[in-house]
Amino acid sequence: MAIETKPTAAMVQNVFSVELAPWPIPADQIKAGQPVARGMVIARSPDKKTFTGVWDCTPGTFDWNYTWDETVSIVAGRVTITSKGGGSQDFKAGDVANFPIGLQATWTVHETVRKVYALISPEPLDL
């Protein structure tokens, strides 16, 4: 019989000092510049459908299609996100946003952007 253990403390990370690994943006999605993305998964559910982490990206423009529901908190930088339908919004440090599954958007990163994200996927992911 397995013994069930419960966490004894919260895991704490500093959003500005976590070590991020390269998370390349596919070349066919880059529209301008040479954006370089990095990320880290801080926590994931056992079924690999829910994730929390940190991501950043240097200036450039790229397309992104959301295959998951994602909520972000921008902690640094500035980005303009334009949906395929034409709506455009600027985001900066302090802004929180939700991007629904199925959204097709273009990210234009003006100043290196860093975000904390929480995503929910209908299918397990290998992040």
Image (cartoon, rainbow, N blue to C red):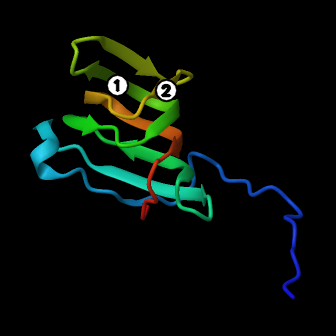
Categorize mark 1 by other alpha carbons within 10 Å: few (<14), some (14-19), many (20+): many
Is residue 114 shown left or right of residue 3? left
Percent from the top left, x then y, of residue 35? Answer: 23, 43
The residue indicated by pointer 2 is 98
Q: Is residue 107 visible?
A: no
Residue 109 drawn above or below residue 54: above
At label 1, which amino acid type do we have?
Answer: Val
* First reached walking from the N terminus: tag 1 or tag 2: 1
Residue at x-position 21% and y-position 21%: 84
Please provide percent x and percent y for residue 110.
29, 26
6 or 21: nearer the eye? 6
Q: What residue does disc 1 label? A: 79
Residue drawn 31% across the image and 21% down it: 80
**Which quarter of the figure has residue 34?**
top left
Residue located farthest toward the bottom when viewing the structure as drawn? 1
- Frontmost of labels 1 and 2 is 2
Q: Quadrant of the C terminus?
A: bottom left
Residue 83 on image: x %, y %: 27, 20
Residue under the point 14% across and 41% down: 30
Look at the numbered disc 1 and give the secondary structure of its residue. Answer: strand
| Percent coordinates x, y for residue 24 in the rendering | 26, 56
Residue 69 seen in the current view: yes
Q: Quadrant of residue 21?
A: bottom left
